[in-house]
Image: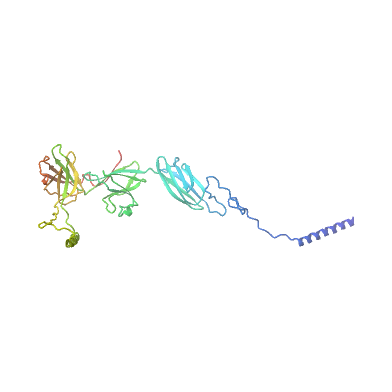
């Protein structure tokens, strides 16, 4: 038994010596870093293509080594701040397009960049904006759809005559009448038609005021005031300082059509214009003398005189067709200048020898007596009997200003 135990001990020592000898002859391999696994969303080392993104995705989901994605949250409300559940939203960017129905929606995993968001509603004006989505951020947008305000108005003078081609501006609080065409391009405005009427569409309620006149020439303005839904949306802009001349022609029934005239004296030319004309006449005379000396043109027979026509003492300033009831109105006449009136009928010309003047905000009435047709010499300007009166408007008669009223 004792010999058996000694044999086992000797065998164990031998096994230990063999194991230690093998460790010295075959050392352990050095430590290695584990290989990085290839993501399913990027190409592998073997050239394999990544799987296609899910339907409806922009391909901007967060992934290792790729730019951060962006997000968007949109809420659509009405003018009172309530949700618009019938709103329709469309988000687009290139070929990407997503449509939503309801008062709110959210998107994540979008590629950063510029998008266009269009929101519409069956009963309200649409809304369209360009939005920039930043990488790694979520943008929140509140869209408020309001019913626009349509204003209807008319521009006249104090006599009620329409003012066509008149510019009207709708200005927010703090804005002023434009002083140049460049400033005018940034403002909201409209132009009256031939009857002095126009329409202005305001994008929202708020404090607005109207101003009338071309850029740099304001004629009429008002203080800012609240323009609200259901409030006054009709206005009449009355401009003061206009001239007004009314004709009343008494003539036999069945007479031929008449044309009324307002005549004025020709304006004296400016000194510089006289000098230019004199220089041009001298050059023309020199060229004519040279042409005569060369025999380029024939001379007139002896005794032939060349006379220039004398300048007219009165010229036509305005013409109007006389209505069937014998009335006609002239506006925008020069104030304080000498004027005469006349009539034309089938080649017959009549002029009144009476000189009159018109003044701002003064009503001038002229009554004319026209003889029967064919009783005068058509080659002679016949005198025209007339009477006239001028009456200044009272301060309370259709005063100048912008007057508002509600739609009836």
Image point (34%, 45%), residue name: 201
Compare residues 227 and 25 and report the one nearer the observer. 25
Q: In the figure, is residue 103 to the left or right of 347?
A: right
Task: Tell me how the rendering is colored.
Answer: rainbow
Q: Position of residue 127 (x, y in %)?
A: 41, 45
Q: Position of residue 75 (x, y in %)?
A: 46, 45
Q: Quadrant of residue 369?
A: top left
Q: Residue furthest top?
A: 253
Q: Quadrant of residue 118?
A: top left
Q: In the figure, is residue 40 to the left or right of 280?
A: right
Image point (88%, 56%), residue name: 4
- Which quarter of the rendering shows the N terminus? bottom right
Does residue 290 sit above or below 320 in this rendering? Answer: below
Image point (19%, 46%), residue name: 319
Q: Position of residue 377 (x, y in %)?
A: 10, 44
Q: In the figure, is residue 229 to the left or right of 398?
A: right
Compare residues 363 and 257 and report the one nearer the observer. 257
- Which quarter of the rendering shows the C terminus? top left
Q: How many marks on residues? A: 0
Q: In the figure, is residue 11 to the left or right of 237?
A: right
Compare residues 394 and 305 and report the one nearer the observer. 305
Q: Residue furthest front?
A: 295
Q: Position of residue 122 (x, y in %)?
A: 41, 40
């Amino acid at each position: 038994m004792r010999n058996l135990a000694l044999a086992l001990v000797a065998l164990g020592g031998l096994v230990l010596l063999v194991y230690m000898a093998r460790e010295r002859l075959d050392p352990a391999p050095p430590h290695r870093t584990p290989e990085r696994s290839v993501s399913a969303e990027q190409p592998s080392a073997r050239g394999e293509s990544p799987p296609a993104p899910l339907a409806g995705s922009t391909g901007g989901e967060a992934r290792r080594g790729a730019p951060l994605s962006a997000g968007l949250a949109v809420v659509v409300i009405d003018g009172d701040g309530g949700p618009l559940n019938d709103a329709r939203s469309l988000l687009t960017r290139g070929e990407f397009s997503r449509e939503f129905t309801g008062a709110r929606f959210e998107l994540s995993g979008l590629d950063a960049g510029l998008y266009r968001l269009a929101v519409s509603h069956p009963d309200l004006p649409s809304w369209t904006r360009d939005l920039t989505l930043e990488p790694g951020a979520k943008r929140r947008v509140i869209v408020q759809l309001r019913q626009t305000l349509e204003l209807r108005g008319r521009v006249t003078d104090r006599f009620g005559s329409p003012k066509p081609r008149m510019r009207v501006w709708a200005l927010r609080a703090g804005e002023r009448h434009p002083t140049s065409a460049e400033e005018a391009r940034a403002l909201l405005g409209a132009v009256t038609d031939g009857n002095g009427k126009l329409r202005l569409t305001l994008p929202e309620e708020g404090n607005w005021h109207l101003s009338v006149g071309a850029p740099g020439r304001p004629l009429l303005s008002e203080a800012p005031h609240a323009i609200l839904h259901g409030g006054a949306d009709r206005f009449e802009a009355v401009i003061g300082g206009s001239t007004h001349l009314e004709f009343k022609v008494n003539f036999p029934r069945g007479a031929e059509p008449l044309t009324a005239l307002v005549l004025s004296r020709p304006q004296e030319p400016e000194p510089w214009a006289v000098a230019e004309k004199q220089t041009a006449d001298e050059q023309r005379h020199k060229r004519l003398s040279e042409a005569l000396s060369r025999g380029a043109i024939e001379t007139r027979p002896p005794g032939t005189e060349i006379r220039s026509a004398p300048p007219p003492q009165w010229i036509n300033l305005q013409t109007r067709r006389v209505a069937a009831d014998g009335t006609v109105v002239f506006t925008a006449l020069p104030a304080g200048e000498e004027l005469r009136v006349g009539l034309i009928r089938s080649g017959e010309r009549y002029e009144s020898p009476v000189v009159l003047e018109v003044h701002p905000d003064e009503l001038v009435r002229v009554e004319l007596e026209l003889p029967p047709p064919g009783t005068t010499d058509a080659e002679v300007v016949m005198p025209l009997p007339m009477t006239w009166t001028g009456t200044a408007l009272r301060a309370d008669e259709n005063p100048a200003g912008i007057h508002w009223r509600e739609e009836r």
